[in-house]
Amino acid sequence: MLTDYEAIRLAQELGIVSRTGAIRLRHTAELLSHFATPDTEEELSKAEGVNALRACVAYVLAAADLGVAMDFAKFRRRLEKETLAPD
């Protein structure tokens, strides 16, 4: 199972999100994880919430070209069906 951090890193390596997008998504994931813990006494501010939402929409939901993701899905299916011969 991939962690949020690993999924963001993989998305960056596959070219699905830019370096800046990956940084913003990692920051958002860390911030939301922090505020989701029961021992956090402070609340997520409205500005922080808006910024988190903006990062998710900009780099995940509004991604114009997800061709890389489709290519990766095809590659994964191919790996599942084929047996690689040893060299």
Image (spheres, grey):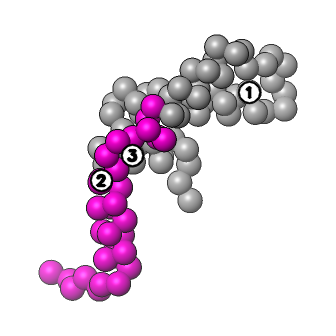
Q: Earlier in the sequence, mark 2 or mark 3?
A: 3
Tell me what residue is drawn at x 84 percent, y 27 percent: 39
Query: Residue 4: where, in percent of width, then height?
Result: 55, 44
Task: Please give left or right for residue 82 compared with residue 28 in the image.
Answer: left
Q: CA distance from mark 2 to mark 1?
A: 32 Å
Camera-near label (2 vs 1) is 2
What residue did someone put label 2 on?
A: 68
What residue did someone put label 3 on?
A: 11
Tell me what residue is drawn at x 35 percent, y 42 percent: 64
Q: CA distance from mark 2 to mark 3?
A: 9 Å
Query: Residue 54: where, in percent of width, then height?
Result: 53, 26
Q: Earlier in the sequence, mark 1 or mark 3?
A: 3
Amino acid of disc 1: Phe
Query: Residue 84: where, in percent of width, then height?
Result: 25, 82
SS state under label 2: helix
Residue 82 appears anywhere in the view: yes
In front of the other: 60 or 18:
60
Residue numbers of the magenta segment: 58-87
